[in-house]
Structures are given as C-alpha cells and as structure tokens.
Amino acid sequence: MSNVQNSLDYSLLERLTQTYAPSGIERAVAEQISEIIRPYCDSLTQDKMGNLIAIRKGSGNGKKIMVAAHMDEIGVMITHIDKNGFLRFTPVGGVHITELPHRRVRFSNGRIGVISQEKLDKPADLKLSKLYIDIGAADQDEAEGMVQIGDSAVFTGEFVWAGSRIISKALDDRIGCFVAIEALKRVQTEHEIAFAFTVQEEVGLRGAQTAAFALEPDVALAVDVTLTGDTPKAHPMDVKLGSGVAIKVFDRSMITPPQVKQWMAETAEKERISYQWEVLEAGGTDSGAIHLTKGGIPAGVLSIPTRFVHSPSEMIDTKDVEAAVELLVALLEGPIPF
Ligand SMILES: [Zn+2]
C-alpha cells in the first residue's frame, strides 16, 4: 500500500484541476491525458463525441472491462451581452445559483470575470435573472472583443494542500481521471480494459452513453466523487473523508447489482483496502448511463468522498485516493466472479 502512496504524482492532479474543460469543450484535458497515457496503451482514440478511449489489450481469456471517468466540469455559458458590457449567463451542469455572487469565472482565452447581482430587496429574491458577469469591459463593443454569445466559463479555485487533504476546483471529476490514469499505468491483467475519459457527464451522462454502446463491455466501473455526511449539521450520510474509497450502492441514476457490490467489497477486504458504502440521495454518474446500454451492462462505481462538491473549494483526502487506486487495480487484475 505504501507502494501506491509514494508513487502518486499529485502535480499531475494539480495540472488537471486547473485546466479549462467545461462540458462540451473537454479538449484541453483530453490532450493532457493523452500525452501521459499514450506509452501505456495498445490503442488511443477519440470518438465522435470527444470521449478519449484507451485500450489495454488482454490475453484473450479475460473479460472486457470499461473504466469511465469524466473530463468535463461545471460552468456557465454566456447568453447575452448588454450595452454596458455586462454578461448574462446560463448554468452548464449543477450550479448552485445562491452561491454564485462574487465568484470568479475564467473563459478559454484566460479572461477573468466576476459574478455579481442586481440590487435585491431581500436575499430570497436572488435568482439567475438577477446575476451578471463583469469582465472589466467599458461597453458592449469592448466586451464583444473578448467574449461571444455561447462562450463557456469555468469557476476559478486554486489547488492547495491542507495536511493530507487537497482543496481545489474541478476535483469533480479530475480526481476520477487521475485514479483511472494511475490504474492504467499500473495494471497487469488478462482482461481487456477500455479506459473511457468521458465528455458531458455534468449535463446528463452523455459521453458515457455513446462510449458504452460502442465498447459493449462485459462489466463497467466508473470513478467519480461523492458527497460526505461528516461536516457540521450535514444531511445524514454515512460517508466520511479519509475513511477509504466509497463503493456505490445507490444514487438517482442506478442501483448497483448485488454481485457487483459483492465483487467490489470482497476484493477490498482481501486486499485490506479501506472502503465504505455509499448511498447518495441526489445526483448520478456515468455508470447510470452505462448500465442501461444495449441489453444492460453490470456496472459499479468507486467514489472519492468529497466535501463541498460543485464549489470552487472541493476537498478530498489523499488516503481515499490511494485506496481508490489500489481497489481499481485489484478489481481489474482479479477474476470477475459473475
Ligand atoms: Zn459533478
């Protein structure tokens, strides 16, 4: 186990989190991942949706396993530019409107804007139509020289360490990409593994849907973040930061089949990897789309417990990351008992 701990290169995670890749514009992250994984793949392609598909061939006697992690992050898209150069916008993915005032956003060209609000009579009046982005333009002409209708921006949020923990924007789901990359580098197996770095998860699991249809795996595993119940007066949830990788049982997109749950938990126990059960009452992830593909594909999820999901300050614990890499590698290397 210290093996994995000492060899994880978190500077790669830092680069991935700070890269601009809102849903539908994942290219910059795809390019970084390609560069890193190319030496470890038997084939590396991008499909028509933009999913990055890396194949590690098997011995011919194994199964075909799909591993999915999404490259996109939440953001906002410009809908209107007014004569004074202020921008109106719509959310791309699960953005909490009430948390937006005075956050910074960054466009693909590096331009920074600050979100602010019209004068409100009372705080409860805050809604999307009251918000605007100020990019420092003097008027509409100057603004239109910097951004256009339909441009997307992402939230800014520096990558910082807090002891064994990391705080950053876009850990959802660059941490899943990071875990998949590390597993891809390490895994030695008779199974054929198709690593799918997917697009447009945040707007409805769209890339995973077409990737799974094309790949037709025997079994699939997604890697994504999940919420925790370990902060003051949190909604009750039995997932804690630092207590190990979470094995998903349920979310709004899927119910994990008993044989997949059992395979994942027994593998963790055999390898002495700390894990916890995840029952997520809101949201879903790529396995939700994958398991409904063709005649149905058995699918599970390894989740990284994450505080403050969809904020610029998501927080994870590296102990959980290490457990996730270890469990994913063990699952890909072992027999599939169903
Ligand atoms: Zn998300």
Image (cartoon, grey):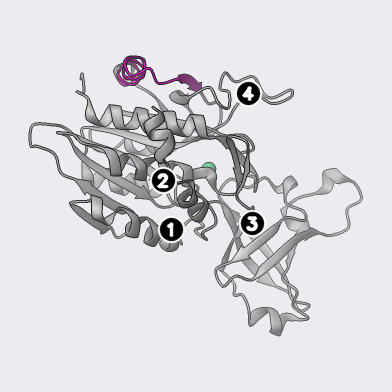
- Number of numbered callouts drawn: 4
Where residue 29 is drawn, which disc sits there?
1
Q: Foreground mark, 2 or 4?
A: 2
Question: Mark 3 belongs to which amino acid?
Answer: Thr
Residue type of the residue flagged with mark 1: Val
User: Mark 1 and 2 residues: CB-CB less than 8 Å, in contact?
Assistant: yes
Q: Is tag 3's residue or tag 2's residue first in the polypeptide sequence?
A: 3
Q: Does the magenta stretch include residue 270?
A: yes
Q: Position of residue 296 (x, y in %)?
A: 26, 31
Q: Find disc 4 in the rendering and name its residue.
A: 229
Q: How crowded is mark 1: few (under 14 residues within 10 Å), some or many (20 or more)?
A: many
Residue at the spot of label 3: 156
Badge 2 density bin: few <14, some 14–19, many ≥20, Cα 10 Å: many
Q: Residue furthest bottom?
A: 141
For label 2, the residue is 177
Separation of residues labelled 3 and 2 (CA atoms): 19 Å
